[in-house]
Amino acid sequence: MAEHSPYQPFSIGGSQGLTHKLTLGVCCMRTKATSNPMQSLLRRLDASGAFNIIIFDEKMILEQDVSEWPIVQCYVSFHSKGFPLYKSLEYVKMRHPVEINKVEDQLKLRNRLTVYETLKSHDIPCPDFMAIDHLDYGDHQFVEADDYIIYDGRKLKKPFVEKPLDGDDHNIWIYYPTNVGGGCKKLFRKIGDKSSEFDSKQSRIRKDKKYLYEPFLPTGGMDVKVYMVGEMYSHAEARKAPTVDGKVMRNKNGKEIRYPITLSEVEKACGALIVQAFGQFVTGFDVLRTTGRSIVCDVNGWSFVKGNQRYYDDCAILVQKFFLDRFHITFTMPIPALKNEERMSEPINRTTPEVDEADEENFQHDKLRADWSESSESFSVTNDFDAAESVAAVVMIIMRHGDRKPKEKHKFKSSHKYFLDYINKPSRTEDDDDEDDSDIGISGRLPVDPHGEVLIKSPEEMEKLLAKVKAALQEPELSDKDRKNIETLKMVLDLHEHFTGLNRKIQFKPTKFAINAHGVEECTEVQVVAKWGGELTSLGRNQAEQLGRRLRQELFPINSDDCTSLLRLHSTFRHDFKIYSSHEGRCQTTAAAFTKGFLDLEGDLPPILVSLVYVDGFARKLLDRPIPKEDRNKVKKMIDTILHTDSSELRPGDLLEIMAPTDHKGTAEAAR
């Protein structure tokens, strides 16, 4: 293990030279012990002169009794596939070495439920969750519908995440609601350049064992991985989330592209608490940055930053210090490591790795910008603004949806009880009847207002309405006019085999009212408006995707073919990309297709839509109701008057005054 290193041997008991070395045992599977990250650490520890390193043979670990294992003072042991963790624990109880990562506490990491419970007990933010044993429900009540599950009265709506309780099972599935097309994203350990795949036909959850269920949290398509070495040292990297398109981005050396980021103070505190809670000095964990919060969704145990030489230097010093402190050994820090000693005296958050060959490609754009900045000093630019004021603060784009199929609409008025009940006896929530309110996620409540409109879009409500329509058509006393209108409504509801919610909606608008026997005003007539069609065409999707690609290439021209510069900004949260959509299906699909082109993504649109496009209450306020209804009705009435006015009976200026009742010359000229 001889290798040149800046480290000099530590002096134990003064500066008279090394009197003895500590024996450091490494007990793990062969693939882990011989991996490049582990070897980088062990070479530095060996070069320090403080340790006599013994790597336990894999065959010995698997086949021999722990009483035959070497006796060591310092112990590095961690679990991976095939590793006998309980034998390692037996060895610890027999020999009592100093553990850098406590073996017994690693049992917590094997079970995702235990991980979440440990996080909660230490007040570390983690997702809301439900644990369900599908092989033995016992007295528990479980219900599965198209767009949600209910367990003991708690409802979890799609999109949600399904995780096996077994921490070694990485087959994590994400289920999408039918109003974005449905389907399931299946995550798995990386195979080549794939980390997930989309299955449009998978909508039912797995019921073969125990699973955790939690809401899917939007993160802008990015994952954050945090590496801790002790409580005070952290290094964080961001990468494209596998939930987006499943394509692993790699550099020219074949390594996954990740970008260093800066952690918030809350995230640093979470890291320190995780080291304490799980007894793991060297560990990693995953963070979801969502809606202004940071949520810890997984704790990995022994983890290394890949390809970062500065990290290995720092990690080696901290590991040395950990073991030497446990044996109360004083030592003189060598001159070449003084800078590292200074860094240990305060909280560390390494955000800028050394640029070695593996990282060179990731940083070439920063170099290009630096070169451009230096050369630009010789240019003389004349303008009326200060240089700082001339930098674009934001690029805001407002766009219409892409090419669509024709929209169709059917309106009729009715006093049928089934339709009046939507106004006078609204459901407690948008898609539940008698379930408990203790939901996981968001549940929208319909207003009890005889003058309020009701919109039906969800598949469950569509199914219920279809059942009512079929029942109404069986009534012999139904009038011919009602029968004709309701048959047309049934035809609209029967258009496709499955309800998607993207391309059909039914509105109920109250038109007449009366006071009932209890002195309460209620609706006596309702206008039923059925809308269908208008879905985005293949051409429309291509238009949106091409527009996103073109915008990326024009805004970020540096090496735009591989999107590295833009993705780097987006990954490190310095590029605040937000895309909002109205609730219209064609608008949501356009937004997802545009995002696919803009961020150079691959695969199906539903995962992109759910991960990156905001269709929340804020987006709806921005896009769905920009003008009050009263003002819209006035404009419609005015347009109707203009269209039905005989212009031959008006003087030349009268029509212009009707069309543009304003003193604004530009508007009047445009109307002329």
Image: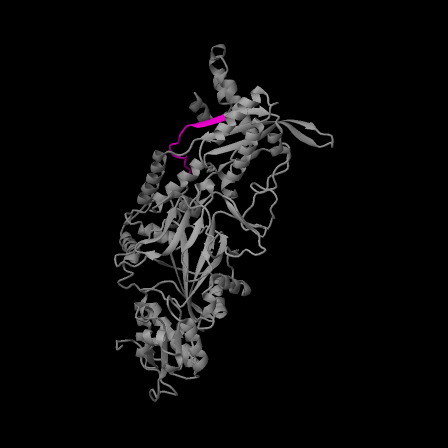
- In the image shown, does 190 or 234 lie closer to the viewer? 190
Let me know if residue 577 appears in the view.
Answer: no
- In the image shown, does 31 or 314 lie closer to the viewer? 31
Report the span colored magenta.
Answer: 398-409
Q: Residue furthest right?
A: 518
- The image quarter in which residue 55 lies: bottom left
- Residue 563: image location, x then y, percent: 31, 49
Which image quadrant: the C terminus?
top left
Position of residue 136 in the picture relative to residue 46 (left or right) = right
Position of residue 147 in the picture relative to residue 550 (left or right) = right
- Residue 392: image location, x then y, percent: 38, 46
Which image quadrant: the N terminus?
bottom left
- The image quarter in which residue 400 lies: top left
Residue 183 among those drawn in magenta: no
- In the image shown, does 10 or 115 lie closer to the viewer? 115
- The image quarter in which residue 91 lies: bottom left
- In the image shown, does 401 or 478 lie closer to the viewer? 478
- For the point 49% across and 31% down, the residue is 493
- Residue 76: image location, x then y, percent: 39, 75
Q: Which residue lies furthest to the top in this view?
A: 649
For the stretch drawn in magenta, what is the main secondary structure? loop
